[in-house]
Amino acid sequence: MAEVILMPKLSDTMTEGVVAEWIKKVGDEVSNGELLAEIETDKATMEFESFYDGVLLHVGVGKGEAAPVNSLLAIIGEKGEDVAKLIEEAKSASTQEAPKEEAKKEVTAPSPEPVTVQEAEPVVATPAPAIVADSNGRVFASPLAKSMANERGIDLANVIGTGESGRIVKRDIEHYVPYVPAMGGGKRAHVGTEQFTEEPISQMRKTIAKRLAESKFTAPHFYLTIEMDMDRAIDMRKSLKELDAGKVSFNDMVIKAVSLALREHPNVNSSWMGDVIRRNQHVHIGVAVAVDEGLLVPVVRFADGKGMEEIGAEVRVLAQKAKDKKLQPAEWEGNTFTISNLGMFGIEEFTAIVNPPDSCIMAVGGIRQVPVVKEGKVVPGNVMKVTLSCDHRVVDGATGAAFLNTFKTYMENPVSLLL
């Protein structure tokens, strides 16, 4: 008997998948546990193994095509087996099981293939041709062209007509380019072509757009910004490097300081669950990583119990896996708080959108050298700003402020991060 394989749900937010590659083709023998296809989810491209022995008799989704979760993906059975009835039954079952709300979903037109569109070359004004006029010096132009020229402040005496017998018509006004004096004398016109490209929206980008829009317009955001002295953090990092005591980045310090501050402020380490607020006693830090198609948030689990060097090594591995689309669900699920750091890109300060189910996300800016007042004197100093975005349904202003001040204390006394 042939076995029907449905599009699997490979992540908690996956609603459809794209077949990135078929490892097996129709007619190939397949063994249980053997790689069947690579499927692109909203977060990664994952290998999909067969659960059956047999021959691949039918492929329901072509390479590069998308299909909803639980729709027909493939059929495996005995060589020569007739599966036409199974195909019809699987398609029918998929249609019947679609939720009733499906009819209410917004209909989106299929994404077009990448194209480049270039407008026709505009008419370029060039000096020289004589203006066609009657014996009284009146320029020949259509009434519409005259009206358009008057509205745009264009002198018809400077327009070259392309209509019958040199008459100025509508298109001549639309494409009129005034003469611009050029360096060294003469005249020139600056012209160009309008161009654009269109790209299909990836599964990742679709999910990012949906989740962030839901967060931004569902969770009432408010923002708290605090500035901290980074002189001691800079000195400690330099000392660790000189002592060859391990590779520690400022981002590693931030993750560690956040995790320790969350221990003391569990109300910030919380999630809005609809009818309850979940107070998380464990600390799992999501670290936003930029990839070609958007943003992924791998998770450093139990970060409060790990050293900065261990955190740094784990983040580097997770970031590379994110860029290679090799993250597994266990590596991107379960965050209780998220950090987004754009300091390395020269950004001094920004706000971020809360990453559900978290109630807060911290936006970390870069370290700047500025004049500061210490012991009544203006001296060079290094400061860093962070902004906490909070879901007001869970976190109040005073709660968020207390958390930020604890975080600041850790960052300004970085030796405490080593204890």
Image (tube, rainbow, N blue to C red):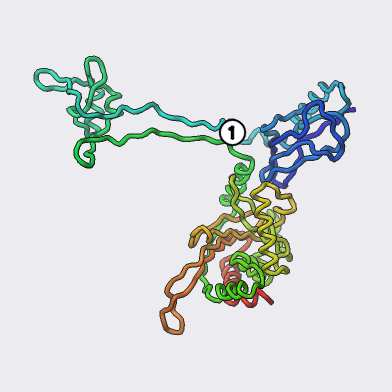
- Of residues 308 and 221, which is closer to you in this image? 308
Q: What residue sits 26% from the left and 20% below the top? A: 162
Residue 322 rendering spot, x and y as whole percentages: 66, 50
- Vertical order, 154 against 139 (above or below): below
- Vertical order, 45 against 224 (above or below): above
Q: Is residue 317 visible?
A: yes
Q: Secondary structure at mark 1?
A: loop
Q: Which residue is mark 1?
A: 108
Q: Is residue 145 left or right of residue 64?
A: left
Q: Is residue 390 left or right of residue 3?
A: left
| Image quarter (top left, top right, bottom left or bottom right) of the N terminus | top right
Residue 47 rendering spot, x and y as whole percentages: 75, 42
Residue 133 rendering spot, x and y as whole percentages: 15, 20
| Image quarter (top left, top right, bottom left or bottom right) of the C terminus | bottom right
Hey, which quadrant is residue 340 in on the image? Answer: bottom right
- Of residues 247 and 84, which is closer to you in this image? 247
Q: Amino acid type of disc 1?
A: Thr
Q: What residue sits 72% from the left and 54% below the top? A: 331
Give the farthest residue toward the left.
136
Give the farthest residue toward the bottom.
375
Residue 169 rendering spot, x and y as whole percentages: 26, 21
- Vertical order, 141 against 190 (above or below): above
- Of residues 40 and 154, which is closer to you in this image? 40
- Of residues 412 and 213, which is closer to you in this image? 412
Would you call the spot at circle 1 few (<14 residues within 10 Å), some (14-19), or many (20 or more)?
few
Hey, which quadrant is residue 151 in on the image? Answer: top left
Give the farthest residue toward the right.
1
Q: Is residue 402 visible?
A: no
Q: Please state the total of marks drawn on the protein image.
A: 1
